[in-house]
């Protein structure tokens, strides 16, 4: 463990030193290249703001309006029939939209039910088995200027759905109630 901690502490400074030494050996204008890179980073960050703002507002409206809760209430009989705890549904719906919101829901589920509970294990597995599809498409497609996403959204949501279903099956088998 000490070796990993030591490597973790030195990996980033070592990478910076390697870049600086390489640039010096190749006689590149290191500072000017750094400033140019910083300018590109700022331009990219500013171009992403409208996409991020739109996504954040949409998520806030979806949760605050009660639409998420109403949808989960509608699904409760089906989830109960399938043996899926309805408490996990907000995580399943939020995870493709926002990683931070999903992490907050996971933390809340673990705080309420405990990390060794079925819900805690299922939330943790689901958190690690799915991705933030809408966030990825918004940020990465927006950063490079792709407006037609083709089948990327469909494939991403199908992958999230498979991750959710697989999480439920695996946790049910491994940690049967």
Image (cartoon, rainbow, N blue to C red):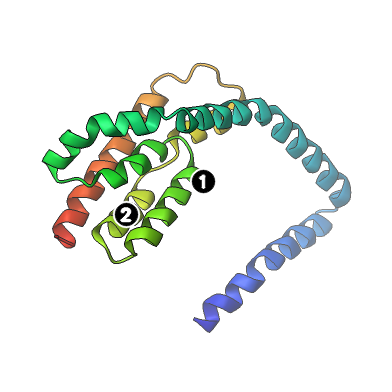
Residue 55 position in % (x across, y down): 55, 29
Query: Is tag 2's residue or tag 1's residue first in the polypeptide sequence?
Result: 1
Residue 111 position in % (x across, y down): 40, 61
Residue at 24 percent of width and 59 percent of height: 118
Q: Nearer the viewer, residue 125 or 30?
A: 125
CA neighbours of label 2 inside 10 A, class few (<14), some (14 to 19), many (20+): some
2 vs 1, front mark: 1
Return the residue at label 1.
Answer: 100
Tell me: residue 77, above or below residue 154. below
Q: Secondary structure at mark 1?
A: helix
Q: Marks 1 and 2: in contact by CB < 8 Å?
A: no
Residue 156 appears in the figure: no
Left or right side of 59 for 165: left
Q: Nearer the viewer, residue 138 or 6?
A: 138
Residue at 59 percent of width and 71 percent of height: 8
Residue at 81 percent of width and 59 percent of height: 25
Residue at 80 percent of width and 54 percent of height: 26
Left or right side of 149 for 85: left
Tell me: residue 44, above or below residue 175. above
In the rendered structure, find residue 125 and report the number of the disc placed on it: 2
């Amino acid at each position: 463990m000490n070796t990993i901690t030591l490597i973790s502490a030195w990996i980033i400074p070592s990478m910076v030193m390697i870049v600086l030494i390489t640039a010096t050996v190749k006689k590149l204008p290191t500072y000017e290249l750094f400033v140019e890179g910083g300018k590109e980073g700022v331009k990219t960050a500013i171009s992403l703001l409208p996409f991020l703002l739109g996504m954040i507002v949409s998520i806030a409206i979806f949760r605050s309006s009660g639409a998420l809760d109403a949808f989960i209430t509608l699904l409760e009989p089906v989830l109960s029939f399938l043996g899926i705890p309805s408490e996990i549904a907000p995580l399943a719906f939020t995870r493709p939209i926002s990683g931070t919101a999903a992490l907050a829901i996971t933390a809340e589920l673990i705080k309420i039910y405990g990390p060794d509970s079925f819900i805690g294990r299922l939330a943790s597995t689901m958190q690690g088995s799915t991705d933030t599809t809408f966030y990825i498409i918004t940020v990465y497609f927006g950063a490079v200027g792709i407006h037609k996403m083709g089948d990327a959204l469909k494939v991403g949501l199908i992958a999230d759905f498979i991750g959710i279903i697989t999480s439920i099956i695996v946790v049910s088998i491994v940690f049967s109630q």
